[in-house]
């Protein structure tokens, strides 16, 4: 039987200020029976439970900004006291130094510093090393964002999904996304501004997709009102298919 390829379902893809009725960044990737959640921003846990309440194998974080990890706190409460308490503890894989920062976040919200320990099997990834989850191989690249954010490349069954996390303008994104079947790329500035060292415009997301030679570009981390304009801007630099992802988007 052929190995399974990654299948993406967008749980939430809003920017830091969220879109009405939509969660912040959170992306479910299924590789055969393995279920991996990339980031877990505000609103993501409830949305995931409503969409597909089956157990997760892992939660992997691109970086530690609140809009990408804030829902780990209520997720852990549910793991302790409610429906997901029957799950085997999913791996929670944070970037270097991330577990201490998550403990501080838990304490700031009124929980104990060890709130996530037990509900999750805690670990940190080494950006220069690979991570194996089920049949998936995950590799990381540090990009350009305050505090550092990591692109996450998932390879399985001869297919590749690359998620940008949050990033400003950097050639490292195209290198890490090289020949990917799908580039899931933040485009916070849409068509309204040039990229800087914090976030990308859709124009530059398109340029990265073109340079990387990816098969499809899916734009995320966008204000809902800017999605159509972002697609138009990305298409000025990238010749392949471009989508502005919304919750429920699959690729």
Image: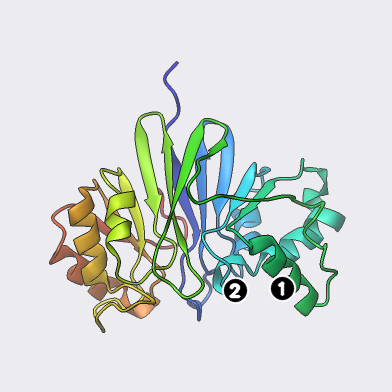
- In the image, what residue occupies the spot 46% across and 71% down? 14
The quarter of the picture where residue 156 lies is top left
Comparing 10 with 118, the one in front is 118
The quarter of the picture where residue 166 lies is bottom left
Q: Position of residue 216 (x, y in %)?
A: 26, 50
Q: CA distance from mark 2 to mark 1?
A: 9 Å
| Residue 82 visible at all | no
**Is 55 left or right of 135, judged from the image as shown?**
right
**Could you say which disc has been placed on residue 127 in the image?**
none
**Could you say which disc has been placed on residue 66 in the image?**
2
- Residue ranking furthest to the top: 1
Specify the quadrant that holds the N terminus: top left
Q: Up-down: is 18 above or below 247?
A: below
**Is 92 left or right of 4, judged from the image as shown?**
right
Q: Position of residue 15 (x, y in %)?
A: 46, 75
Circle 2 crowding by C-alpha within 10 Å: few under 14, some 14–19, many from 20:
some
| Residue 126 visible at all | yes
Q: Earlier in the sequence, mark 2 or mark 1?
A: 2
- In the image, what residue occupies the spot 44% across and 47% down? 8
Q: Position of residue 117 (x, y in %)?
A: 80, 55
State the count of labels: 2
Comparing 93 with 30, the one in front is 93
- In the image, what residue occupies the spot 38% across and 45% down? 161
**Could you say which disc has been placed on residue 105 in the image?**
1
Label 2 with label 1: CB-CB less than 8 Å: yes
């Amino acid at each position: 039987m052929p190995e399974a390829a990654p299948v993406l379902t967008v749980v939430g893809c809003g920017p830091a200020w969220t879109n009405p009725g939509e969660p912040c960044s959170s992306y479910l990737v299924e590789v055969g029976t393995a279920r991996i959640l990339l980031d877990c921003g505000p609103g993501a846990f409830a949305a995931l439970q409503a969409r597909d309440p089956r157990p997760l194998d892992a939660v992997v974080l691109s970086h530690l900004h609140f809009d990408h990890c804030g829902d780990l706190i209520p997720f852990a409460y549910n793991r302790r006291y409610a429906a997901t308490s029957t799950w085997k503890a999913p791996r929670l894989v944070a970037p270097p130094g991330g577990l201490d920062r998550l403990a501080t976040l838990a304490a700031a919200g009124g929980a104990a510093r060890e709130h996530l320990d037990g509900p999750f099997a805690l670990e940190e990834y080494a950006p220069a090393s690979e991570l194996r989850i089920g049949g998936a191989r995950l590799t990381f690249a540090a990009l350009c964002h305050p505090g550092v954010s990591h692109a996450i490349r998932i390879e399985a069954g001869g297919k590749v999904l690359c998620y940008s996390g949050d990033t400003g303008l950097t050639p490292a994104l195209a290198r890490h996304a090289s020949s990917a079947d799908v580039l899931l790329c933040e485009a916070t500035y849409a068509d309204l501004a040039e990229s800087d060292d914090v976030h990308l415009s859709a124009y530059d997301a398109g340029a990265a997709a073109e340079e990387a030679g990816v098969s499809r570009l899916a734009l995320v981390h966008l204000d809902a009102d800017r999605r159509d304009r972002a697609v138009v801007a990305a298409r000025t630099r990238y010749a392949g298919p471009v989508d502005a992802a919304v919750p429920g988007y699959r690729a």
